């Protein structure tokens, strides 16, 4: 749903001279299908092993009792993220200026 909402405003973002990019810990083979299915006009980048999210201190480990719940709903994070821990990044949005400097969160 978040990707669909971002797609809806991507034309406005581009009209302002900016680019929208999303970053996810999911492996590219999974994000390609989502990109195609939703006809996204922005890139989805893979943060392999959540190295970027770690730098922004956004990663958290799911408690053990949630592992089975995620697995029972088909969300095997170890397979989707290529790591054994059940970690997720907190959703975050940042503005980076044209020079590549961090402007701030939104």
Image (spheres, rainbow, N blue to C red):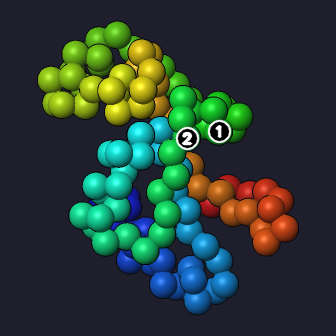
Which residue is the site of mark 1? 52
Using residue 90 as the reference point, say whether residue 5 is left or right of it.
left
Residue drawn at x 31%, y 72% as measured from the top left: 39
Residue extending farthest to the front is 29
Mark 1 crowd level (few <14, some 14–19, many ≥20, 10 Å Cα): some
Image quadrant containing the C terminus? bottom right
- At mark 1, the secondary structure is helix
Label 2–label 1 contact, CB within 8 A: yes
Residue drawn at x 38%, y 77% as measured from the top left: 8
Which residue is the site of mark 2? 47
Figure quadrant of residue 20: bottom right
Residue 46 at what x, y percent from top left? 51, 45
Q: Is residue 32 above or below residue 41?
A: above
Q: Is residue 51 above or below residue 38?
A: above
Figure quadrant of residue 83: top left
- At mark 2, the secondary structure is loop
Residue 41 at what x, y percent from top left? 43, 74
Residue drawn at x 69%, y 63% as measured from the top left: 95
Residue 22 at what x, y percent from top left? 51, 57
Residue drawn at x 48%, y 69% as measured from the top left: 42
Image quadrant containing the N terminus? bottom left
Mark 2 crowd level (few <14, some 14–19, many ≥20, 10 Å Cα): some
Residue extending farthest to the left is 72
Using residue 92 as the reference point, say whether residue 66 is left or right of it.
left
Q: How many numbered dots are placed on residues in this image?
A: 2
């Amino acid at each position: 749903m978040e990707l669909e909402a971002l797609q809806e405003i991507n034309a406005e973002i581009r009209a302002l001279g900016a680019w929208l990019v999303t970053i996810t810990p999911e492996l590219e083979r999974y994000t390609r299908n989502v990109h195609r299915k939703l006809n996204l006009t922005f890139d989805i980048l893979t943060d392999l092993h959540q190295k970027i999210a770690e730098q922004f201190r956004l990663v958290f480990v799911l408690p053990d009792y949630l592992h089975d719940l995620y697995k029972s709903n088909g969300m095997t994070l170890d397979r989707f993220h290529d790591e054994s821990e059940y970690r997720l990044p907190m959703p975050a949005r940042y503005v980076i200026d044209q020079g590549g400097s961090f402007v701030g969160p939104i």
